[in-house]
Image (tube, rainbow, N blue to C red):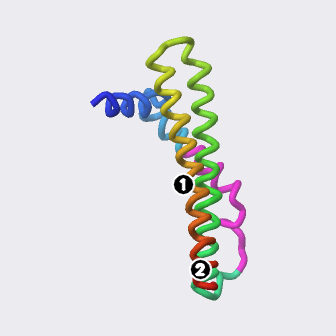
Amino acid sequence: MEQLDLLKTLLAFNFKNKKVMNKKIFILILLLFFTLPSLISAEGAPTTIASIVETVKNQLTALSAGLATIAFIVAGIMFLSATGNPQRMQIAKASLIAGVIGIVIIVLANGAEAFVKTFFGL
């Protein structure tokens, strides 16, 4: 039950009202759209299933790494703004752990993909 309350507090920490949240999400989507030029390039589509899967994997890796970086930045800001409040420090710590878990998942997913390719000789 305590974890659920912690999660609710974490989600409501930066987004006090819905209008601000929608604006932040819109700005984040715009930034991601323009910082991933391969999503907006005018090149022809990949011709094989393997190249399509590889492109999707690379895009998801880049996107998730960017989101994990943002999680680290948010956790740092939360730590700085906690000002010794134990509940806010716990929320910031949970956010930092979530960022670390995200990075670990990214690394393990890419490692598993490389292992499968090597194992099957692809």
- Report the residue at 57% width, 42% height from top: 100
* Residue 8 percent coordinates (x, y): 36, 32
In three-dimensional space, the C-alpha distance between marks 2 and 1, rounded to whole angstroms, equals: 21 Å
Name the mark on residue 105.
1
Quadrant for the C terminus, please. bottom right
* Residue 73 percent coordinates (x, y): 63, 34
* Residue 68 percent coordinates (x, y): 59, 45
Q: Is residue 27 magenta?
A: yes
Q: Secondary structure at mark 1?
A: helix
* Kind of residue at badge 1: Ile
Q: Nearer the viewer, residue 25 or 14?
A: 14
Quadrant for the N terminus, please. top left
* Kind of residue at badge 2: Phe
- Report the residue at 65% width, 82% height from top: 46
Name the N-terminal-most of marks 2 and 1: 1
Kindly tell me whether residue 17 is visible in this rendering: no
Q: Which residues are magenta?
A: 26-43
Query: In terms of secondary structure, what is the magenta stretch mainly?
Result: helix
- Left-right relation of 85 to 2: right
Q: Residues within 10 Å of mark 2 (few under 14, many from 20)?
A: few
In the rendered image, which quarter is residue 9 located in? top left
Q: Which residue is mark 2?
A: 119
